[in-house]
Image (cartoon, grey):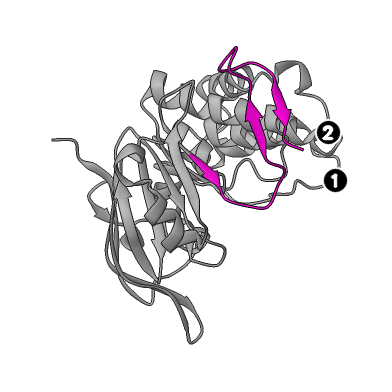
Amino acid sequence: MKKEAIVANELTLGYDEKVVIDQLDLEIPTGEITVFIGGNGCGKSTLLRSLARLLKPQAGSIILEGKSIHKQSTKDIAKQLAILPQGPEAPEGLTVMQLVKQGRFPYQGLFSQWSEKDEEKVQYALKATHLTEFADRPVDSLSGGQRQRAWIAMTLAQDTDIILLDEPTTYLDMTHQIEILDLLFELNETQNRTIVMVLHDLNLACRYAHHIIAIQDQGIYAQGRPEEVISCELVREVFKMECQVTADPLFGTPLCIPHGRGRCIVKQEVDSFGPYKALS
């Protein structure tokens, strides 16, 4: 039986008097991609921040690799998990190389200097994210997709088994969204990294996740494999939207088609993937 990378017991989170997550029990499976989904303001990002020890719980506990996360040192935590928050910003003029090197800070100490291993991890991270040729470029001169890859490279240089990402595809175009998610998928497939993400795109969540956790009403509405939990009823209850759920024609994963008031189009019968014509 596969053990859990992170376990939360009776977790309550909030800000001042406002409770966002209430007595939640959660298990993040090791070596899988887990995606949090849910409506705006439901607590997805709050929950992710708490799993990285960036937000102290009002009640309950979080267990990381068998030990309480709040009884471990910051440096020990940083050697076990890395987090990429939403919309990170680098200081003006900071190069990609300088940013990626920051991922090795947890391994530096009073008596330890930059080592061959540190350099190897940095070079690997640049290569894995296809940024070697951009190493000397300022981060703020890169495109949106390149900047996001640079931040992911920093988390890779940190060399942790667990990576947490808060909406890593926000503000990226379709090409760069797939590029980033393919990279994370490859890290999971080839290195068995445990990936935990917040995603807004339900169809991309279904395509890339092994495990989906739907957050609603300060707790978990449903969790499990995408094909087990994604349904018209879940979308209606969690997102307050009517839809049709079918199979993704390329991957076979659940595909959510929302109802709306857009143009009505019909496929020509000649080719199921052929041209469309609009109804007049």
**Label 2 secondary element:** loop
The residue at the point 48 percent across, 65 percent down is 43
Residue 213 visible in the shown view? yes
Q: CA distance from mark 1 to mark 2?
A: 8 Å
The residue at the point 59 percent across, 13 percent down is 271
Which amino acid, by three-letter code, is at mark 1? Glu
The location of residue 245, given as percent across then percent down, is 44, 41
Q: Is residue 214 above or below residue 57?
A: above
The quadrant in which the N terminus is found is: top left
Give the left or right position of residue 69, taking residue 75 as reference. Answer: left
Q: Is residue 261 magenta?
A: yes
Q: Which residue does the numbered mark 2 point to in the structure image?
A: 138
Q: Residues within 10 Å of mark 1 (few under 14, many from 20)?
A: few
Residue 53 visible in the shown view? no
Please identify the residue farthest to the bottom as the structure is shown: 17
Q: Picture quarter containing residue 141?
A: top right
The location of residue 143, given as percent across then percent down, is 81, 32
The location of residue 239, given as percent across then percent down, is 50, 60
The residue at the point 38 percent across, 46 percent down is 230
The location of residue 36, given as percent across then percent down, is 44, 51
Q: Is residue 208 above or below residue 164?
A: above
Which amino acid, by three-letter code, is at mark 2? Pro
Q: Residue 241 bears which disc, if any? A: none
Asked if the residues shown at circle 1 and circle 2 are in contact, with their CB atoms under 8 angstroms apart, the answer is yes
Segment colored magenta: 256-280
Q: Is residue 134 magenta?
A: no
Q: Picture quarter containing residue 254?
A: top left
Q: Residue 92 bears which disc, if any? A: 1
Q: Earlier in the sequence, mark 1 or mark 2?
A: 1
In terms of depth relative to the viewer, which is nearer, 234 or 98? 234
The quadrant in which the C terminus is found is: top right
